[in-house]
Image: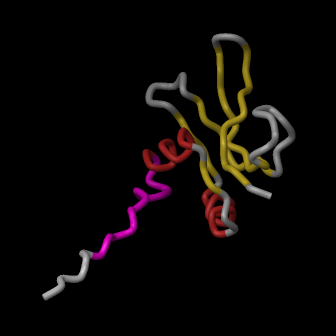
Amino acid sequence: MSVRIRLSRTGKKAQVSYRVVITDSRAPRNGRPIEQIGSYNPRANPPLAQIKTDRLHYWLEKGAKPSLTVSQILKRQGLIGPVAAPAETPPAQQE
């Protein structure tokens, strides 16, 4: 089972807000989540994100992968750092 951290839409038309949820990657966007770990309100100025950091780190340790949008929100909040690319080793010089 591939677990994702993503947004689930709530609110009325033109008054959108989101929940940050842990869910199976194959589940529909507003399907039943495994766990709700926070909320995100893009209409606030600046956008407001409230996330349970202990549960976030628990799920990240278990291998859950955040969606692109959630990872950007988490980076803005300072909850996760930029993902470092693996360093390439230079090819061995032959003489």
Q: Give the number of callouts.
A: 0
* Residue 3 vs residue 90, the one in the foreground: 90
The percent position of residue 64, horizontal first and vertical second, equals: 67, 59
Query: Whole-percent x and y of residue 77?
Result: 46, 48
Compare residues 67 and 11 and report the one nearer the observer.
Answer: 67
- Residue at point 39%, 62% (across, down): 85
Q: Describe the colour scheme in one phrase.
A: secondary structure
Left or right of 76, for residue 6:
right
Give the farthest residue toward the top. Answer: 14
Foreground of the two, 34 or 12: 34
Task: State the residue lying farthest toward the left.
Answer: 95
Left or right: 51 as drawn, with respect to 47:
right
The quarter of the displayed image where residue 9 is located: top right
Identified at 73% across, 21% down, the residue is 11
| Residue at (79% x, 43% y) in the render | 26
State the predominant SS element of the stretch in magenta: loop
Image: magenta residue range: 77-89
Residue 49 x/y as whole percent: 56, 40
Q: Residue 55, position in %: x, y?
A: 69, 60
Tell which residue pokes out farthest to the front in this image.
Answer: 95
- Vertical placement of residue 27 versus 64, above or below: above
Q: Which of the image's four quarters has the N terminus?
A: bottom right
Which residue is painted at 76% across and 33% down in the image?
29
Q: Is residue 7 above or below residue 86?
A: above
Position of 79 compared to 86: left or right? right
Whether 83 is among the magenta residues is yes
